[in-house]
Image (tube, rainbow, N blue to C red):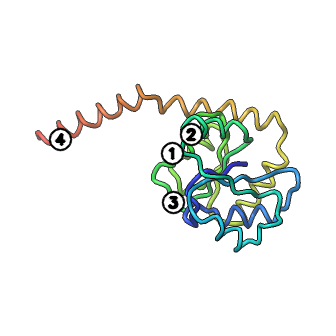
Amino acid sequence: CLFFSRLHNQKGLDKLIKAWIDINNKDWKLDIVGFGNAKYYIKKFNLTNYKNIKFLKPIINKNKKMQLFDNYDFFALPSLSESFGLAILESLARRVPVLTTNNTPWSDIQKKNSGWIINSSLIELKLVLYEIFKSSKMELILKKNNTIKIVKNYTTAKISKLYVKTYKKLISNKNN
């Protein structure tokens, strides 16, 4: 599992680490990448000797960042609030299913079966992590393949058309 975002409580990182520790599944690992105070989380959760949770160095290079996603079965961002969540789109673009909350504008993830949407509670997070850990390879591959259904809505051409449509509407409203 990859967490790739700013290291901040608003991103749900505390809950994710707590859930991961409580479940203590030896077969899965959580890699955390982002700018912020990793030492705070390492100390708070006593992660020094915990082998299934690692903090990796932040990545700035776009190519390296995109390649990073390719190494994971799913992406987790149990955010308490997101206006868009670019990392979610980046994950989907690399065919990596997403676990996030209903506090993000990504309800399509659940509708298109390309990940998991939960309320931002520790109990729901644990339940969905149990579900993911028990998933077969085929179930994860299906979710990976379904990410394309979402990403195709965010091409440059589609976004550009939406901007033009919005600007035309604004101009016509201004003239009325």
- Disc 4/disc 1 C-alpha distance (Å): 30 Å
Which mark is drawn over residue 90?
Answer: 2
Q: Is residue 78 above or below residue 159?
A: below
Query: Tag 3 or tag 2, which sits nearer the N-term?
Result: 3
Q: Residue furthest right?
A: 26
For the residue labelled by badge 4, is the local secondary structure a helix, a strand or a loop? helix
Q: Which residue is mark 3?
A: 81
Query: In front: mark 2 or mark 3?
Result: 2
Q: Sequence order check: which comes first, mark 2 or mark 4?
A: 2
Label 1 secondary element = helix
- Quadrant of the image occupied by residue 38: bottom right
From the viewer's side, name the closer residue of 78 and 175. 78
- Please name the residue shown 72% across and 63% down the image: 17
Relative image position of residue 67 (x, y in whole percent): 65, 35
Q: Dividing the picture into quarters, in which one does residue 119 lie?
A: bottom right
Residue holding disc 4: 173
The amino acid type, in three-letter code, at marker 3 is Ser
Estimate the x, y position of residue 131 in percent, counting from the top left: 79, 51
Q: CA distance from mark 3 to mark 1?
A: 13 Å
- Quadrant where the C terminus lies? top left
Name the amino acid, label 2.
Glu
Q: Position of residue 32 (x, y in %)?
A: 67, 54
The residue that disc 1 covers is 86
Circles 1 and 2, Cβ within 8 Å, touching? The answer is yes
Give the crowd class for mark 3: few <14, some 14-19, many >=20 residues within 10 Å. Answer: some
Instruction: Please identify, in this view, whether the residue under mark 3 or under mark 1 is nearer the observer.
Output: 1
Q: Which residue sits furthest top? A: 157
Give the residue type at disc 4.
Asn
- Contact between labelled residues 3 and 2, with CB atoms less than 8 Å apart: no
Label 4 neighbour load within 10 Å: few <14, some 14-19, many 20+:
few
In primary-sequence order, the first of circles 3 and 4 is 3
